[in-house]
Image: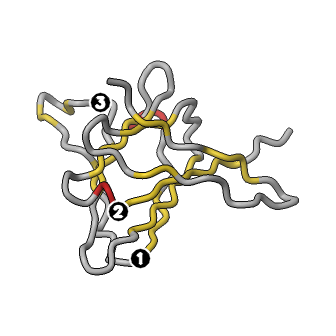
Amino acid sequence: MARTSIPIQTLTRTGTVPGNEVKGDDVNRMYWANNHGETIVHIVNRHASNPGRVGFEFFEETVDGVIVQDKFTDSIPAGGTIICGPFPTQFYSRDNLDVFVNPVAGSAHSLWFRGYELEVLG
């Protein structure tokens, strides 16, 4: 089954209204497309008492022959919010610029995701 897409909005100088959130998915896992290295992810834990965790997959799965594990966030406290990023393309993006996100089983149902990228000016 396909990964669940995290909606990404562009931040502009004139302001951006926060967009829709998507519920965490630890079965199909998650991703966002077209990472350009300037994306941040906003994660809310809506559980009243349990912390949550999520991993961001490294694209390079081995470095000098050693397997690289997912980059995990710190624990997201119950009722808390964290903002993660940016995610440099050389470490996190696949050839098609997708970034894979892996909520940890048992906490995904209470995590809600949305993302933002910087507007490219010029």
* Residue at x 37%, y 25% (from the top left corner): 2
Q: What residue is pinned by disc 2?
A: 110
Q: Which residue is mark 3?
A: 60
Residue at label 1? 80
Q: Amino acid at mark 2?
A: Ser
- Disc 3 residue crowd, few under 14, some 14–19, many 20+, Cα 10 Å: some
Q: Residue furthest top?
A: 95
Residue 81: where, in percent of width, then height?
45, 72
Amino acid type assigned to the residue bearing label 3 in the image: Glu
Which percent across, then down, holds residue 24? 37, 51
Question: Regarding mark 2 in the picture, which secondary structure is present there?
Answer: helix
Asked whether the viewer can see residue 91, the reply is no
Distance of label 2 from label 3 (alpha carbons): 29 Å
Of the pair 88 and 9, the residue shown nearer to us = 9
Tell me if I can see residue 85 in this picture: yes
Q: Disc 2 or 3, which lies upstream in sequence?
A: 3
* Quadrant assignment for the N terminus: top left
